[in-house]
Image (cartoon, grey):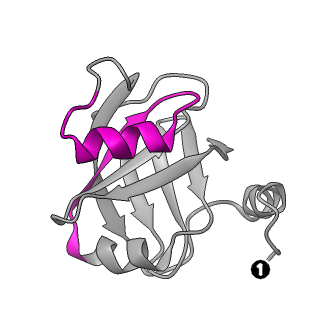
C-alpha cells in the first residue's frame, strides 16, 4: 500500500452534503471500491484504490462534526484546482462540465481508533505534513 499526501479542501453545501476536492496523486481512482475512513477524532484517509491511500492529517472541527451524520462524501479530483472558481460555481449552481477530471461518491467508515497505517508510514506522513509525531 502506498500512502500519500496531497492538497485537499472540503465544501459543505449547507444541505447536509460534503464534497472533498483533491489534487489527485498519480494513478487512477477505483471509484467502486474507494472509501473514506475517519478515526473518530481528528484524522482520516481516503482509500483511493487498492494500492493507494491519501492521508488527511487535519480535519477541521466543522468537518469532524458533520462526518457522524453522513453516509458518503463526494470526491472531486482536479490538478491545480482553484477553490474560488469552485465556490463561485456552486453559488451560481453552474459548474463547468469538464472542470473536474473525476467525481465519485465514497462511503464513510468511522472506526473510533487510530487509522490502520503502519507506524513507519504514519510517522513519515506526519513528518512530511509538518506535524509532530504522536
Residue under the point 40% across and 76% down: 62
Which percent across, then down, holds residue 87? Answer: 37, 46
State the image quarter where residue 21 is shown.
top left
State the image quarter where residue 96 is shown.
top left
From the viewer's side, name the closer residue of 92 and 100. Answer: 92
Magenta stretch in the rendered image: 69-95
Task: In the rendered view, tell whether residue 44 sits above or below residue 85.
Answer: below
Residue under the point 34% across and 43% down: 88
**Where does the C terminus fall, quadrant-wise?**
bottom right
Residue under the point 76% across and 63% down: 126
Residue 84 belongs to the span the image colors magenta: yes
From the viewer's side, name the closer residue of 124 and 42. Answer: 42
Which percent across, then down, holds residue 20? Answer: 40, 50
Determine the secondary structure under disc 1.
loop
Other-residue count near label 1 (Cα within 10 Å), few / some / many at <14 / 14–19 / ≥20: few
Which percent across, then down, holds residue 89? Answer: 30, 38
Farthest residue in the top direction?
98
Task: In the rendered view, tell whether residue 45 sits above or below residue 49.
Answer: below
Residue 85 belongs to the span the image colors magenta: yes
Q: Which residue is mark 1?
A: 134
Asked whether the viewer can see residue 111, the reply is no
Amino acid at each position: 500500500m502506498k500512502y500519500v499526501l496531497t492538497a485537499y479542501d472540503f465544501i459543505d453545501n449547507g444541505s447536509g452534503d460534503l464534497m472533498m476536492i483533491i489534487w489527485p496523486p498519480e494513478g487512477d481512482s477505483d471509484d467502486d471500491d474507494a472509501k473514506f475512513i475517519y478515526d473518530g477524532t481528528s484524522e482520516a484517509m481516503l482509500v483511493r484504490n487498492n494500492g493507494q491511500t491519501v492521508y488527511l492529517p487535519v480535519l477541521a472541527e466543522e468537518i469532524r462534526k458533520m462526518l457522524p451524520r453522513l453516509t458518503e462524501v463526494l470526491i472531486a479530483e482536479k490538478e491545480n484546482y482553484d477553490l474560488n472558481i469552485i465556490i463561485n460555481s456552486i453559488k451560481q449552481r453552474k459548474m463547468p462540465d469538464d472542470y473536474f477530471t473525476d467525481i465519485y461518491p465514497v462511503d464513510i467508515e468511522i472506526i473510533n481508533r487510530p487509522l490502520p497505517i503502519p507506524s513507519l508510514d504514519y510517522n513519515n506522513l506526519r513528518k512530511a505534513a509538518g506535524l509532530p509525531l504522536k
